[in-house]
Amino acid sequence: MIRHLRAAALTSAALVCLVSRVGSQAPAPAAAAPGFDLSGYWTAAMHEDALERGAGPELADYGGFPINESARLFALSYDASRVTLRGHQCDGYVAPYSVRSIGNARAWEERDPHTHRLIAIHWYNQTFEGHRVIWMDGRAHPPAWAPHTWMGFSTGRFVGNALQVQTTHLKQGWLRRNGLPESDQATLVEFFVRHGDHLTHTSVITDPVYLTEAEVRTTDFFRQHTDHQSWLFSCDDGEQILGRAPDNVPNYLFGENPFVAEFGKKYGLPAAAYLGGAETAYPEFPARVAGLPAAEGASRLRPAPGASLTSRAVDPEPSDDEIHVWPLRDNLYLLAGDRGNIVVQVGGEGAFVVDSGSGRLVDKTLAAIRRLSQSPIQFIANTSFRPEHTGGNDKLRAAGTDPSVRGTFFALQFADAGVGATIMAHQNVQTRMVAAKRPADGTPSDTFLEERRRTFHNGDAVEMFWERNAVTDGDSIVHFRRADVIVAGDVFTTTQYPLIDLQNGGSVRGEIDALNDILRRTVYQHEGEGGTIVVPGHGYVCDEHEVVEYRDMLVIVRDRVQAMLRKNATLEQVKSARLTADYDTRYGAATGPWTTDAFVEAVYRDLSRRK
Amino acid sequence: MPNARRRLTTAGALLLVVTAPVLAQRGGPPQAPPTPRAQAAFDITGYWVSLVNEDWRYRIATPPKGDFAGVPLNAAGRQAASAWDPAKDEAAGESCRAFGAAGVMRQPGRLHIDWAGDDALDIETDAGSQTRVVSFAAPRGTGGGWQGVSVAAWDRGDSPMARGGFFPGAVAGGGSLRVVTTNMKAGYLRKNGVPYSAAAVMTEYFDRFDLAGGEALLVVSTEVVDPTYLVTPFWTSTHFKKQRDAAGWNPRPCSAR
């Protein structure tokens, strides 16, 4: 009995200690709030927006979305036939739209096998096999130059009774799949709340490019207790329309979408009501609907008169005067920070560097390369003669050596052959750098005239392809075939309209051909994303999706300028028509080296001379 | 008494003896339990404006008769919806059918929520000028009107941890306001006569989410169960944005059209 009493007393004392200790603690901070288990099978209740989410939205129905002019014009220009293009057939849904889609979802936890701390919550959507990873371990979001994906990069924490999730790095996708866009600049805040077997999901989308205020949506899910075993949604693209020209991107010219009136006729609503805008979501709006004049709707089908808007996108290039290294794949790395992007392949045969930046931070570039590889730089490939891609040539060259040249017949002709790195480029790069009196040590010494230059280096087949008359007449893209990384140079950027440098041999047609040439070489990994990595001359690391959207944009703008040229429009008339209005909030610039006006003028002048 | 049972009993008694005073002392002298208002999981009061971007076409204008996509109606429900006649409703003095508790939250409008004492909330809507009293104690009234009878509770989950009953220091922040509404006068889920019956039971969860920049959202997750007209529960979630003041508050009468 004594022994029993002693044991009970000890137990009681321990409990008292526990209660006292816990009770004396301050309330847990919000971030450390006890979580709940999201795991299980969830099916979206389709009671809201049932037709839109099931069969699909009606054309030109943008009511309730706080969209700006850019978004509306983008959507009105969108021809659903665009999904027949190879580059769009397998487009996935971006995270916020994915949650809203029809189908089932499954959630599960990933825990550290030793500590059982929650590392991540996985949310898998059946539609387009959208697999989200919500990191719960406190990790930081990637930098601005990191790739964007359909699902984006998500971090979460429990706040009160909700799982709050923050998502960045989303691809361009749909707010609604009738053409209403969400940009790659959108960010997402979500709240998951469980009420028993009822899950309410709230998403708050902020998009400086296409929205005037946050877009809030709430979606209901109910819990399934059994696995319905239908999880796959595979997609493989194919030939859908034979013989279509590669520069054919289905689109409607401003004011010529033939389906705009359909929705209004069907439901008795004026166009100004269903063409969207923040005001259409507020309670004051119903009283105005009946009185909205037809002219107000008609005016929204074309760009409003006035000055062009400018980009609201985040600058994806670092501006801290440091060189930042981002691993691409295998032995390839991006070096960002010296204006133009630099790519380095490292290995026993010496570094292979594509482009050398502006040269302003070349010492730091060199230091970064040396941290990746102790071997001297053997090759430098230039995608262009432009200073932000060749500015560091001379110093990088001096820091390298090309042992493959020494002792060869070629070495007999040059006293310093093989002493520095070999600089490769198309002949026109050399010609233009010589003409510009650039330092001789930084001028390409190994040039080619047609098609491609190839070499096998550090275990990879490396090919430079000449993109004839794209941005200039000397552009190349560099394809590391084993790593499957394409370095696009200024042929493709995420920061501005295509820099069509007519004076140096650039052309609209050549630029479209160059973008299509990239797309002929890319292979996506899954649902239109991943696979071949495309490094732009400026901007964040991409895959083929961003190139497709960029190609589409250029083709569409070209079509619009071409249509006005057919009506003998002057340059001033073309500029004042704001033919880039749906892209200006993403790529537009009013100042700097490449303005919207300069781009439109280049397109106009190039097409005019070919008229 | 077998030894094992005796040991357990002894230990249990000692536990009670030893821990009870400690637990009691933590709260000091016996006090009245906190009121629902004092226990509020979040501040629900103030003016909230609806953001109508879901079911927009059904909410921003009255949809055509027979257009009830998404609502899990049974045959009787479809028949009733197809017989919708707003003129008849007006003549019968029942223009508020779409402004009953199960329909009014979907109307474009603003909410004004405030405490009515320590154990009830008033939820006013400017659409249809309706007021629903949500009681945390005994039901207020017997219902039968458009707003029925609503009983509320703060819902902090089911675990002792979440309730704060066992480890008070570890209580979760936040929680939901759970409201169950019964005894509603038959009305419309949508303005074009999509029906719910007097037998319908509506369960709502109100959640507040605070955003960066000081904005806040109120999300109302609603389940309507109606054995008369629905084959499954009807689920919607409706969201409102917090207003600083009463700007835009515009009480207006019900309208059948």
Image (cartoon, coloured by chain):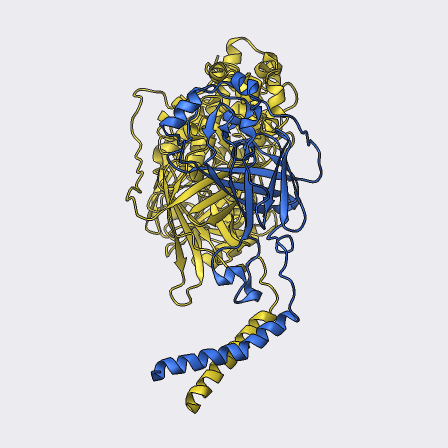
Chain colours: A yellow, B blue
Which one is in front, A455 or A241? A241
Q: Which quadrant would the N terminus of chain B be assigned to in this image?
A: bottom left
| Image location of residue B54, percent across then percent down | 51, 31
| Image location of residue A534, percent across then percent down | 42, 40
Q: Which residue is drawn at 46% across and 19% down?
A: B65
Q: Is residue A91 above or below residue A69?
A: below
Q: Which residue is drawn at 39% across and 48% down?
A: A411
Q: In which quarter of the image is residue A309?
A: top right
Residue extending farthest bottom: A2
Does A227 sit left or right of A151 as displayed?
left
Which one is in front, A177 or A595? A177
Which one is in front, A136 or A239? A136
Residue extending farthest top: A567
Q: Which quadrant would the C terminus of chain B be assigned to in this image?
A: top right
Q: In which quarter of the image is residue A427?
A: top left
| Image location of residue A105, percent across then percent down | 37, 44
Residue A210 shows in this picture = no
Residue B187 shows in this picture = yes
